[in-house]
Every structure is written in C-alpha cells, then in structure tokens.
Image (cartoon, rainbow, N blue to C red):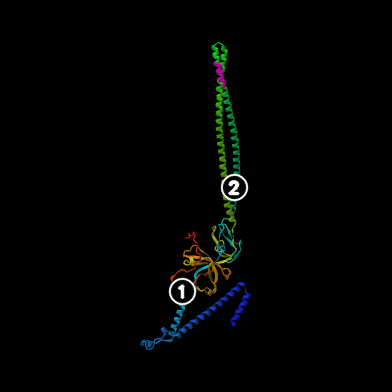
Amino acid sequence: MLLSRLHRWRLSLSMKMSPTRSRLVDRHVREEDMFTTLNRNIRRIGNLIHRIGNLIVQLKAPFLNDIPEKKQLPSMRIVGSRRFFMDLRYLLLAMFVLFLFALVFVPWQQTSQGVGRVIAYNPVERQQVLGATIKGRILKWYVTEGSFVKKGQVIGEMVDNDPLAMQRMQTQLESIKEQKQLAEEQVIAYKNKIKSLQTARKLRLRANSLKIEMSRQKYKAAKQKVAAIQASLHTASINLRRQKVLRKSQIISRRKLELSELKVAQLRNKLSEAKAGLYGAKAAIVASRAMRLKKSALDASKIDSAKAEYQTAKNKIAYAKNRLAKMEMKVARQSSRKLQAPRDAVVLRLLVGQNSEMLKIGDPVAVIVPKTTKFAVELWVNGIDIPLIRANQEVRLQFEGWPAVQFMGWPSVAVGTFPGKVSLVDATSDKGGKFRVVVTPKKGAQEWPEAPFLRQGARAKGWLFLNNVRLGFELWRQINQFPPSIKKPETKEMKPLVKKPKRK
C-alpha cells in the first residue's frame, strides 16, 4: 500500500513538472521497477539452486554415498565428517552442473566496448577558437566567461599600437588609386596610338602600292617607246642602204644620202635615250618596292613598340589592383577592431586580459562553444574489433552523471543506458592504435538527454552489439583473445558468365 501510494504521488508530481523533468522522473521509476524485477529473478535462481541441491541429497547417488563404517580407516573414524560439508559438496556440484548448462545453452550478446565523450555532430558547432583580427591589444571585453552570445554580437574590441595607423593606410590607399587611374589613362592613350599607327600604315602602304603601279606604267611606256624607236631605226637603216646603192649609181644626190645618214644617227640617239628611260623606270619600280618594305618595317616597329608600352601600362594596372586589394584588406582588418561571435554560442574562456598583452593577427583570444542542435558521441575502440564494426550498428551508451547498469551479454537487462547507432568509423587510427567511432541517436528509440543535462565534453561509455553466441563460445574467445564473430551476409550464388555447352 505504501509503495502504491508513493508511486501515485510520483505520477501526480510528474504531471505538474516540465516535460523534460517528467521524462527524467518516469525513467527513474522504470529503473526502480527493473531493479525490483532483477532482484526477484535472482531470488528465483537461488531457490532453484537450493531445490536442485536438496534433490541431489535425497537421491543419494551411489557415487555420492558415504563410505560404509566397516570400510572406513581408523583415521577417518577419528576425524569424522560434518553434515555441513556434505551439503556444501552437493551444492557445489549442483552449481557446477548449472554452469555447464549455462555454457552450452545460455545466449550471449557479443559487444565491443569503447570510451569517449559527447561532441556536436555538426563540426561547425564544436568548440572554436577566436583569433585577433589586427595587431594590437584587447581594449575591452563586453562579455564574461559563461555568457551566451548571438551571431554577430560584439564580444570585445581591439586597438592598434599606432594611433595614426588608420590615417597612414588611407593615404597609401588614395595614392594607389591615383596610380591605378594614371595607368588606365596610359592604356587608353597607347590603345589609340596603336590604332592611329595601324591606320597610317595602311594608308602609306596604299600610297606606295600606287607609286609602284605608276612606275610599272612608266616602264611599260618606256619599253614601248624603245620598241617603236628600234622599228624606226631598222626602217631607216634599210633605207640608208638603198640610198647608198642608188648613190653609187648616181641616181640620187649626195644631199639625200646625208639626210638618210643623219636620220639613222638621230634614231640611234633616241634609242639610247629610250633605253635609259626604260632602265630608269625599272629602277624606280625596284626603289618603290624597297621603300614600301622599309616604311612597312618602320611602321611595324612603331606599332610593336606601342603595343609593348600598352602591355606595360596594363601590367601597371594589374600591379596597382593587387596593391589596392592588399591595402583595402589591411584597411578592412584595421577597421574591424571589434571581435564578433561567428555563431550563437557560450563563451568558454577569455584567454587574454584587457590591455595586458600585445597580439599578432591570428593569436587566440577567446574560446566559444556554439549552440548544439544535434549531439553525437565519439568512442575510441580497440583496433581488434574495428574490422567488424559497420555503419548503423546498434550501440548502448552510458553518460557521465547518469546512473546505469549494463550487462554486456544481456542488453535487455540494461538500466539507465541510451540507444544509438554507428554513424561513421575513421579511416585511420590514432597513435595508440585506437579508432574513432561516431555514434548518433537512433530514430524511433529512447531520446538522449537534452541540454543542459547533456553537454559537449561529457564522458561516455559505449557498447557496440555485434552478434549473438553461446556463453561458452564467448568465454573461450575471451580466454584466447579472439576477435568477436559476426554473421556473414547471405549472398546468392552467382551464375556463370559463360554458359557451358550442352552435351548431346
């Protein structure tokens, strides 16, 4: 009656409490019920062993009968034997029989045990170290250790050693901007220069081509003139020969012969002049071509020089942009003197005091623990069991500060433990040869304690369930230090890729 009243009082009290507190009370009630059931089962086993001992005593097996009094030695009669030792012998024999029975028939759950701690499943929600953003010292802290801060909240302010550093950086920034602007103007000027040089080159090449064509026409005219004079000379020479023949015959006068000779001489002079003009026209063509090549080469040289200057100006712009980006970064860092929280978190440690230490960029100044939305447990497991651990395997966890009883062979008798599943196993071990196994809550099972009852860094112990075997096999494995056994997945027999020919 007293226990039932106490139970009802706890139930009514749990209804008035918060949901989290109510779940804790309900769980403690379930644990007490499980302990009561366990004690009841132990008493039943003790009564069973006592009954078996009494049965053996009543049977009086021949191999257990007392030695007849006639066959006893004198020393045995003097010493004698007590009934207590006889009953103890029967009891030990019954316990030995029960032990053999347990080794053969009692099932045992193989487990792999590991020890670790509670962590945040998301890596960005784990402990983080904040670094100094500028060279200088901490001017003021706006929070204390244990304070809860939100994302973007200012937790501290830094100050530079040089009070005029910001002004100097601004002056350098303006100078770099001017250099960049001048370089951009040079690029535009050289670009226009290249265009004008290319246009002038095209026009000059066109003029030279026209001049060459004119020289060709002159050469052609001179050539035709030479041909005409040669024809006239040939005709005059024939006429002169006729005139000489006629003169010998006294048919024509001497004056007419002299006129014919004069004409031949004049035509020869004209032919010489025409040939000179022809050679001059040909030389003019060659000279025009050479002049065109020379001017084309000069124009190309000027254009290449302008292009080189254009590329130099572009390099100046790139260099100025690089310096500008670096200077803007320095100015931004210098202006970001306030330390802000990257996430919703709790300030764990303030590593530097106010106006006490000179810091460099990146030096740690504070440690925060972000707000955790999903907990996990990292267990360190012996390497002998790692080949048998797979993802989604069942795990039972015991958290520090939560009373629990875990029977390795009988997980159903466990009290105060929480279910979980294997999320991942590290690909390599630590220096001690142990592997990290990350365990997450199991969906649809008992929920883990919530914050602040469960925090990052709390120690935990875990049992990874592998396979069900007999108690005797597990005892033999532990003595020989064999790895746990695990069932092989059932696989269908693969069909041959090539069919064998049928025999007729």
What's the CA distance linking mark 1 and mark 2? 84 Å
Q: How many marks?
A: 2
* Residue 86 in picture, x, y percent from top left: 43, 85
Query: As displayed, is residue 157 above or below residue 45?
Result: above
Q: Which residue is mark 2?
A: 180
**Residue 243 appearing in the image:** yes
Give the residue drawn at x 57%, y 50%.
322
Give the residue drawn at x 59%, y 29%.
217
Q: Residues within 10 Å of mark 1 (few under 14, many from 20)?
A: some
Q: Nearer the viewer, residue 132 or 369?
A: 369
Quarter containing the N terminus: bottom right
Q: Which residue is mark 1?
A: 472
Amino acid of disc 2: Lys
Q: Nearer the viewer, residue 11 or 484?
A: 484
Q: Nearer the viewer, residue 474 or 425?
A: 474
Query: As displayed, is residue 131 above or below residue 228?
Result: below
Amino acid of disc 1: Gly
Mark in front: 1 vs 2: 1
Magenta-drawn segment: 231-241
Image quarter for residue 190?
top right
Magenta residues: mostly which secondary structure? Answer: helix
As helix, strand or loop, the secondary structure at mark 2 comes to helix
- For this orientation, the residue located farthest to the bottom is 70
Q: Magenta segment: does it hold 208? A: no
Q: Magenta segment: does it hold 234? A: yes
